[in-house]
Image (spheres, rainbow, N blue to C red):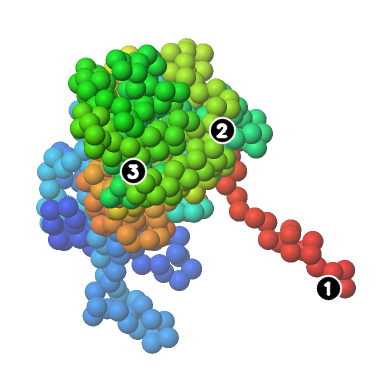
């Protein structure tokens, strides 16, 4: 099969003339387009070829076709020159054909030699070789699309090939990124997988593959309104939201949080000398010893970073912390009210009251609807639901609410993963517009939080059975250490040089020459790269049954409607 199909004399292109470590140059005498015979030319940029190295055949792709500089004017009809030209092609070589198994394998088993012949790859055989290299056989697999150069042979990957080492879906606006994400979701559903989609824009609201839709307000039709409990946030999260200054407000806020934590730990029961009053820990002119004893007894629980306390009491507790450290008459007691500290904390106190009861932060501090933490926990334990969507469409940008909220949810899922919840029941989390939520620091110079939860999932989630799909149109804004953790990349058209360079650096299988094809991809086309593939191959992604709603405004319809009849 291989000797007949891979080195068909009718598909002969030329002969190798220069060999480098990853690329060869070959004479390509049939590459010139003759007048009225253009269709008979063989060898164009983008064509896949096989190089005949006797017992071994190598797969390559033409990345450049040119003629020697001395022959440049021979192809100019207006000069009446002779038609004798000698085109030369550069070929990127990246895989070998295993003759015994009749399939492609990664890497070069040998290097070509000057004089080896080059043949245009037959689409049908090329598609068969790519398909056989993936070795899905009768195993459960996911069909993403068809091979552009493989006679439309379907490309099927095992779930572990696509998601086992995380997956990245990249593409500029209009390149097909959202379409691919919808196709991936439908394949997960049909294969019986479980996934959570975090949808920042709401464009995936109508997908039939999604079982349930959740949102953080009541303004999205077809969704269940939820909130994520603030008790799952950390002190750093609250500091990034409340923005205390560093000199007085920050220390007093930490003291207030610690006091409320102590009240929660003790269940409201007062230690000796009654320092609890009206759900607050009152220090003003109270003995210090009971407070110190309680801190020492519960120091491990108090060191927990999570905010397990009554947030509605934070304002009053902050005021209660504004006392002198000692009393003038009795140094074993706290002192009286410190008016200077009270004045300094007044602005913070007002800000806390405004934010805790604001509509913008009702997603964290509100109580409307069920807890998303409980929903996620039940979803993970359930065998009935397969894919759910959490919409961030109407979550506000003020106070870094979006970034903090999704970071908190990612941290919650990673915490579950570290308890081995997903080892036997793997879960896929899908983050669209990932560049908005990775690697950034939100807050100010006095209080900030790093958006690192999904980066940590990429770094360590795989060993726990928690894998992620990160989709973005700006891979340059995703930290390099996160990109390097993505095993399989589906790359649509990227027109920005920095985006392409970021993908090149993250993927050892895609060098600069192969990346030159990325800006030329049409909508719906992508180059897929991964450890399960013998080489980067272009595919046409399958059309989803219901495409996502990612279309922009219809200018023509609106503008025509505004035109007066006389126009």
Q: Residue at x 34, y 22 (%)?
A: 275
Residue at the spot of label 3: 338
Secondary structure beneath disc 1? Answer: loop
- Closer to us: 56 or 443: 443
Are the residues flagged by discs 3 and 1 in contact, CB closer than 8 Å?
Answer: no
Within 10 Å of the Cα at label 1, are there few (<14), some (14-19), or many (20+) other Cα atoms? few
Q: Earlier in the sequence, mark 3 or mark 1?
A: 3
Position of the C terminus by quadrant: bottom right
Find the distance from the CA under tag 3 to the CA under tag 2.
Answer: 44 Å
Find the distance from the CA under tag 1 to the CA under tag 2.
Answer: 44 Å
Residue at the spot of label 1: 567
Q: Earlier in the sequence, mark 3 or mark 2?
A: 2
- Closer to us: 191 or 74: 191
Q: Relative to 432, is 414 on the left or the right? A: left
Residue 551 screen position, x and y as percent: 60, 50
Residue at the spot of label 2: 215
Image quadrant assignment for residue 429: top left
Find the distance from the CA under tag 3 to the CA under tag 1.
Answer: 73 Å
Q: Nearer the viewer, mark 3 or mark 2?
A: 3
Q: Nearer the viewer, mark 3 or mark 1?
A: 3
Q: Earlier in the sequence, mark 1 or mark 2?
A: 2
Are the residues flagged by discs 1 and 2 in contact, CB closer than 8 Å?
Answer: no
Q: Relative to 563, is 61 on the left or the right? A: left
Residue 47 visible from this viewpoint? no
Position of the N terminus by quadrant: top left
- Closer to us: 72 or 342: 342
Residue 404 visible from this viewpoint? yes
């Amino acid at each position: 099969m291989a000797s007949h199909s891979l080195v068909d004399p009718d598909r002969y292109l030329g002969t190798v003339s220069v060999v480098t470590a990853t690329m060869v140059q070959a004479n390509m005498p049939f590459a010139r387009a003759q007048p009225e015979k253009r269709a008979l030319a063989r060898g164009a940029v983008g064509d896949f070829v096989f190089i005949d190295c006797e017992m071994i055949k190598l797969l390559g792709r033409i990345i450049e076709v040119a003629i020697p500089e001395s022959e440049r004017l021979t192809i100019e009809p207006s000069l009446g020159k002779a038609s004798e030209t000698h085109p030369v092609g550069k070929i990127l070589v990246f895989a070998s054909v295993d003759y015994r198994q009749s399939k492609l394998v990664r890497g070069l088993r040998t290097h070509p030699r000057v004089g080896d012949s080059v043949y245009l790859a037959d689409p049908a055989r090329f598609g068969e070789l790519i398909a056989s290299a993936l070795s899905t056989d009768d195993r459960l697999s996911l069909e993403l699309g068809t091979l552009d150069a493989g006679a439309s042979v379907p490309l099927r990957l095992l779930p572990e090939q696509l998601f086992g080492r995380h997956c990245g879906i990249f593409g500029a606006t209009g390149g097909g990124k959202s379409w691919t994400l919808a196709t991936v979701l439908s394949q997960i559903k049909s294969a019986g997988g479980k996934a959570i989609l975090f949808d920042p824009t709401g464009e995936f609201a109508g997908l039939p593959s999604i079982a349930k839709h959740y949102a953080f307000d009541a303004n999205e039709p077809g969704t269940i309104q939820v909130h994520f409990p603030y008790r799952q946030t950390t002190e750093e999260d609250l500091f990034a939201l409340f923005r205390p200054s560093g000199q007085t407000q920050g220390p007093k806020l930490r003291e207030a949080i610690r006091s409320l934590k102590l009240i929660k730990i003790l269940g409201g029961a007062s230690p000796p000398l009654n320092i609890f009053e009206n759900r607050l820990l009152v220090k003003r002119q109270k003995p210090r010893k009971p407070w110190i004893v309680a801190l020492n007894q519960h120091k491990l629980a108090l060191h927990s970073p999570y905010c397990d306390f009554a947030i509605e009491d934070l304002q009053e507790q902050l005021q209660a912390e504004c006392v002198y450290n000692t009393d003038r008459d009795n140094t074993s007691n706290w002192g009286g009210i410190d008016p200077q500290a009270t004045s300094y904390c007044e602005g913070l106190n007002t800000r806390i009251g405004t934010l805790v009861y604001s509509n913008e932060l009702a997603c964290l501090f509100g109580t409307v609807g069920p807890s998303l933490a409980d929903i996620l926990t039940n979803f993970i334990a359930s065998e009935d639901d397969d894919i759910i969507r959490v919409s961030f469409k109407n979550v506000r940008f003020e106070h870094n609410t979006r970034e903090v909220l999704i970071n908190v949810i990612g941290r919650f899922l990673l915490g579950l993963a570290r308890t081995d919840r997903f080892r036997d029941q793997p879960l896929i989390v899908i983050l669209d517009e990932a560049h908005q939520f990775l690697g950034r620091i939100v807050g100010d110079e006095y209080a900030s939080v790093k958006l690192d939860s999904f980066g940590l999932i990429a770094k360590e989630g795989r060993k726990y059975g928690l894998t992620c799909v990160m989709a973005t149109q700006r891979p340059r804004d995703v930290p390099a250490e996160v990109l390097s953790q993505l095993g399989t990349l589906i790359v649509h058209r990227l027109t920005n040089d920095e985006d392409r360079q970021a993908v090149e650096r993250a993927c050892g299988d895609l060098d600069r020459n192969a990346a030159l094809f990325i800006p030329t991809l049409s909508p719906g086309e992508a180059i897929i790269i991964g450890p399960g593939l013998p080489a980067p191959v272009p595919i046409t992604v399958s059309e989803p049954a219901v495409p996502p709603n990612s279309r922009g405004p219809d200018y023509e319809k609106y503008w025509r409607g505004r035109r007066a009849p006389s126009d």
